[in-house]
Amino acid sequence: MDTNVFCLNMATLKNATEIASGDPVFCRECNAAFNMFSRIEEQKKDEGEPCQLWTCEFCNTKNDVMIEPEEIPKSKEVNYIMEAAAQVMDKKLAGARENTIVFAIDISGSMCVTKQIVGKHSIKGDRTKALMELMKFSDGSDQRIQGEANVTYISRMQCVQAAIDSQISDMAKNAPDRRLGIVTFNHEVTIIGDGSKDPQTVAGDKLFNYDYLIENGATKGS
């Protein structure tokens, strides 16, 4: 049995090479590629129409081809552009539109825990302005523990809200057709979805019933 061994120098990938558009031509028997050393024989069909014949250099299979002179490789290395950059971007955008993003949000009591951050910050979920109305019942002073004049307490929930708000803003700009949904959970799960339907709550033993969850997701989610 004959064995063919090829040594490929992958370093050539970084070098400037011939760029070709369209599809490369392969042998129908061994899949060898038509290259600069390949030869085309101009022939005529029985009807007298001209045709081209390429005899593969590796397996001697005769292939009917149709290659224009400008399509013949002129160097040993050719990079074929299978898709234009615009086509690749269109596919990426189409994929982004087909994706569905579901935000699963923990709304349990632990999400109210705050952390001290140096500086004055106002992020999503900040209720400082809403609480200012209560100041009319006080002397108007800002009561703080000593050393906390320039700090802000931010809860875990505020961090989650700010992160989701940022992602939604980014998707509205770059993937406006992408579908979004929300699921919240604590001791029970509330499926809000995209807001087009009434929220559904799953609680108790149903949370551990696999068959119910699968069936419910298939029927309610459609």
Image: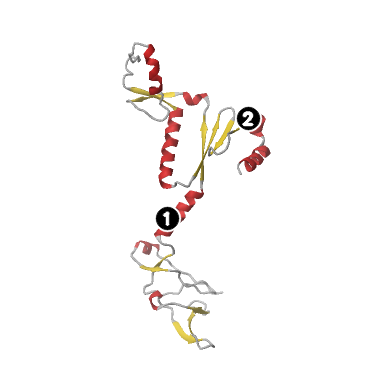
Q: Going by the image, does 73 lie left or right of 104?
A: left
| Quadrant in which residue 217 is drawn | top right
Q: Nearer the viewer, residue 55 or 213?
A: 213
Q: Nearer the viewer, residue 5 or 206?
A: 206
Label 2: which residue? 203
Q: Nearer the viewer, residue 30 or 49?
A: 49
Q: Up-down: is 49 above or below 9?
A: below
Q: Residues within 10 Å of mark 2 (few under 14, many from 20)?
A: some
| Quadrant in which residue 164 is drawn | top left
Q: Amino acid at mark 1?
A: Met
Q: Residues within 10 Å of mark 1 (few under 14, many from 20)?
A: few
Q: Are marks 1 and 2 in contact (CB under 8 Å)?
A: no
SS for callout 1: helix
The residue sitting at 38% across, 30% down in the picture is 123
| Image position, residue 6 (x, y; %) | 46, 69
The residue sitting at 42% across, 55% down in the picture is 89
Q: Up-down: is 6 above or below 170?
A: below
Q: Which mark is residue 89?
A: 1
| Image position, residue 219 (x, y; %) | 64, 42
Q: Nearer the viewer, residue 4 or 46?
A: 46
| Image position, residue 34 (x, y; %) | 45, 74
The residue sitting at 51% across, 24% down in the picture is 109
Query: Split into 4 quadrants, where in the image is the C terminus?
Result: top right
Q: Which mark is residue 164?
A: none
Q: Up-down: is 152 above or below 196?
A: above
Q: Amino acid at mark 2?
A: Ala
Mark 1 or mark 2: whose residue is earlier in sequence: 1
Q: Going by the image, does 204 lie left or right of 119?
A: right
Q: Going by the image, does 81 lie left or right of 105?
A: left
